[in-house]
Amino acid sequence: MSESGPINEMQFRLDWTNYYIGFWYVAWPGGNWLCGVWREKGDAEGTWRRRVRIRLFADDKDFGSQDVKAWEELDILTNYSEEMAKYRMDGMRDGMMERISSELPADSIKCDYLDVRGNGKLARSLISTKSWASVKKMYPPPPYHA
C-alpha cells in the first residue's frame, strides 16, 4: 500500500505480499470514511500499518472527481495481536459514527467492515464485491508471492 504523488492523490494499493486484516467504512450524506489495516512483508509480528481516507463529495464520479479527499497515515501499531489491532480500529470507526450521528439522523449513516485476514490478492477479490469500493486495475498487477 505504498503511495506515489502528493498526499491528496494517495490511495490504497493492494500489494499481493502484504497481509490485510480488513477495511472499515462509514458513509453519510455528503461523504465517507475508509480505513485499512495491514502488515507489510518484512514487518515484525505485531506490527500494523493504518491509513485513513475521508472523502467529501463534490460530484458523482468514482475516478477523476472533484471530491475533497484527506488521507492520513496513522501511527504504526506495534506489539498488537491481530485481534487487538482490529478492536482498536472498531473503536475508531465507532468514534467516527458517534461524531457524525451527533449532526445527522442515525438511519442516514451506513457502516461496513470487510474482514480480509489474508494477502492482497484476497483483499482485492473481496473488496471488489463492495458497492462502496471503486477498484481500478493496475497493469501490471503487483507481484504475487504465495
Image: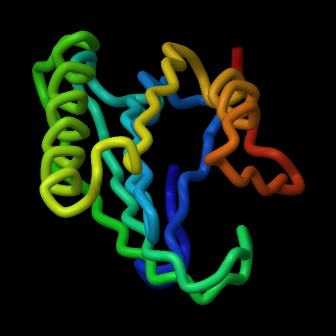
Q: Nearer the viewer, residue 123 or 128?
A: 128
Comparing 144 with 105, the one in front is: 105
Q: Quadrant of residue 45?
A: top left
Q: For this rendering, which residue is in front, 81 or 57?
A: 57
Figure colour scheme: rainbow
Quadrant in the rendering for residue 125: top right
Residue at x-position 44% and y-position 27%: 113
Relative vertical location of residue 27 with respect to residue 20 in this rendering, above or below: below
Name the residue nearer the viewer: 119 or 67: 67
Q: Is residue 104 above or below residue 62?
A: above
State the image coordinates of residue 114 (x, y, percent, origin top left).
51, 25
- The spot of residue 16 in percent (x, y) is 66, 32
* Image point (52%, 77%), residue name: 57
Residue furthest toward the bottom? 66
Residue 67 found in image quarter: bottom right
Quadrant showing the C terminus: top right
State the count of labels: 0
Position of residue 10 relative to residue 24, above or below, is below
Horizontal and vertical percent position of residue 144: 74, 29
Q: Position of residue 79 (x, y in %)?
A: 11, 20
34 shown above or below 124: below
Measuring 44% from the left and 52% from the top, which residue is drawn there? 27
Q: Is residue 18 left or right of residue 33?
A: right
Q: Residue furthest right?
A: 139
Q: Residue at x 13, y 56 (%)?
A: 102
